[in-house]
Image: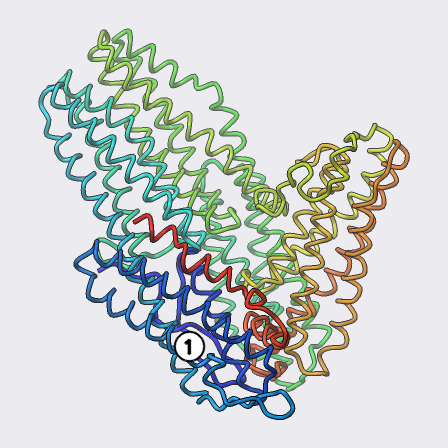
Amino acid sequence: MATSPCSSSGVSSSSSSGFTMDSGLEIKTRSVEQTLVPLVSQITTLINHKDKPKKSDKTLQAIQRVGQAVNQAVGRFVTVGEAIANENRELKEEMNVACSEAKRAGETIAQLTDVASVDQPESDGRVTIYTDKNAVVKAARLLLSSVTKVLVLADRIVIKQIITSRNKVLTTMEHLERVCSFQEFVQIFSQFGNEMVEFAHLTGDRQNDLKDEKKKARMAAARAVLEKCTMMLLTASKTCLRHPDCESARINKEGVFHRMRRALEQVIEIVTDVRVNGEIEIAPISIYTGIKEFKNKVEGLRENFYFLSKENLTTLLELILEHTEDFTDSAYTSHEYRERILELSQQAKMELEQLISVWMQAQTQKTKEITEDLELAILKTRQCMTELRRELHNAATVLAADQLKNHADHMVLKALKIAGSEGNLEAVAEYTFKLAEQKEQLVETCRLLRHVSGTEPLEITSIHAEDTFQVTGPQIISAAETLALHPSSKIAKENLEVFCEAWESQLGDMSLLLREINDVFEGRRGEKRTYLSLPRPGKHNANLKTLKPVKLDGEEQGKVAKLGLELRLLTSDVDSETEKWEDQENEIVRHGQSLSSMAYSMYLFSRGEGLLKTTQDLFQQAEIFAATGLKLSSLLHAFSNQLEDDDKPHLLLEIDKLIARSQQLQLTAKAVVQGKNATFTKVDTCIQKTKSVMIVLVQVLPICCKLQRKCKSGNGCLRSPHTWRENRMQTAEDSLDGKTAEAFGVRSLEHHVANLTFLESK
């Protein structure tokens, strides 16, 4: 049985009303999340209103409308679930039970919120609600649990469709492997093509629906293999049919089939979360990941001397330095880089020894405050690891750039094609040896790039590139040998062309990978995120449509460049602060990274580079930057509301600065100016004000990080255990009086629950 997208049927939620659910729910797909989250919000709001025994008539009517709307939306949701049940016999019983539970719970909630069931109004025009709160909580739990069950079952059907589609593809592949005539091959391959298209659609939808970026990257890699191998399978099979006694043609074809089977297996492992052979997947550790973890642990000593052992740090450093041997032992690492890496590795050992010595001394003295010696040792250790990471990054990326430059002309591939067409076996042997050398170089380079990739998805892309070169190299060689044995064969020539194109395509992908790794290292990773996409004309500011974009001249560009450099340094500071957070998915961190990336794009503009080509682009980017700063201010306020009073003042002061400076930038960016001088002044002011926001951000992030760690260590800085999301949900309760049903996002709930396109289309 395939694993569901949720690990339990409960939803993490709590309130002062006593409404709590299991917190173990793991939502793996966006479609499930988008359905459950609004429902959780509505149910929480309905339950929270019970805290006050007396409500006005207006409030009661609003509550009733919400209750009825929830019931109606659940009714439509149940109709979809029942339709799915009728189409899938093996899940019909389970689905119908879950649908019945959801329907019953929805009806119960509607009854419990029905004004008609409440006593007559008292003399002051208000009524007292006597409904049993436990009944409301019970109905809410049943509703969320049953809706989740329906979604889990529906998701199992989606997974089953992918598995069924994969099985059809595998069956047809087996027929293709055994086929003996061209006519039969053409018929079966036509069927195979249609099945692959269906499989591509199903897996593409799943890839887009996945929340886990690592799984998305793995799915993308597997689907890329299947896409490229489909054409290889066609030409390799045709070559084998034309030359049935040719051993190299047979090897070539078998390699394609084997690779496709592996890719199909990987897709199923991703969608089911189960390894086909039952083994536990052990992810390779990259140096980047190790250094990041090591630096975080060292940084943690500032807060707590006793939270880890010296053996823990020593072991982690030894593991990192063991991986650096991939660089120092590589025949392709230059002598200069090798010496520098060895030197920094030795320095890292010494810095850690000094850190441990000072650290142990501080423990012996039982001091509570961090000493100057320990602070200095922490800084020196972190700096050394930063330099080591930079040296490793440079070694890998310079090597990759050189490799791409050396192989850009594809001379070896061209020579192989010519030698094969001439039937020159000696020349083919000579150039296959050179291609094998190229393959080893590229495989080694991809292995080093993985160590410095900077993100898990890029690590996976590096591994995919390594595997592709490892496999495609020998396939080109077998295809070239086949052509050399049959130089007049058009299909053998076409087959070699297809494999050579795959090699060239992978070199292009590697070039893109290198650029993305450099972007991450330099802090430009945000340029590939949606928040950095420039708005469409007229979308955000109608005034911008009538203005003519302006490009700065050389003198103006020079004046702006100095400001831009200051902005660049601030983005480095912000990136350094965000790296210290253990939870990289934290909303404060993500908004900080977003602001840093946008500021970096402005810095690139000051140099005449990057995505922002005109002053118009810059002003639009500044407006988005300011809006993101205000969103971050709201998040910080929500966080501050959870803190004890002693922890608040400093943070609130910085929040006020952030709001003021973001608003100033917003006004500047929206201001309409005409003329070259006015435009240049606006550019200058936008960058200045962006810089002022970044200065506040550099102050805010470490404060929040420190408070977050304080909370995590159990020092009680939080007033209540509510999460920020729950806190935002509870704000709906405060504005309950006098609001219509729309105030609770009922339309949003109806949209997510009643219009589940991912369910209705199945």
Q: Quadrant of residue 212?
A: bottom left
Query: What residue is disc 1 on?
Result: 109
- Compared across the picture, whether 30 is left or right of 294 comes to left
- Compared across the picture, whether 432 is left or right of 746 comes to left
Task: Tell me the colour scheme of the image.
Answer: rainbow
Q: Which quadrant of the figure contains the N terminus?
A: bottom left
Front residue (pair 63, 363): 63
* Residue at x 40% of width, y 85% of height: 135
Q: Say if 82 sits above or below 532 in the image.
A: below
Q: Residues within 10 Å of mark 1 (few under 14, many from 20)?
A: many
Q: Say if 240 sits above or below 574 in the image.
A: above
- Compared across the picture, whether 212 is left or right of 693 comes to left
Q: Quadrant of residue 611?
A: top right
Q: Position of residue 229 (x, y in %)?
A: 29, 31
Q: Amino acid at mark 1?
A: Ile
Front residue (pair 502, 590): 590
* Residue at x 72% of width, y 37% of height: 617
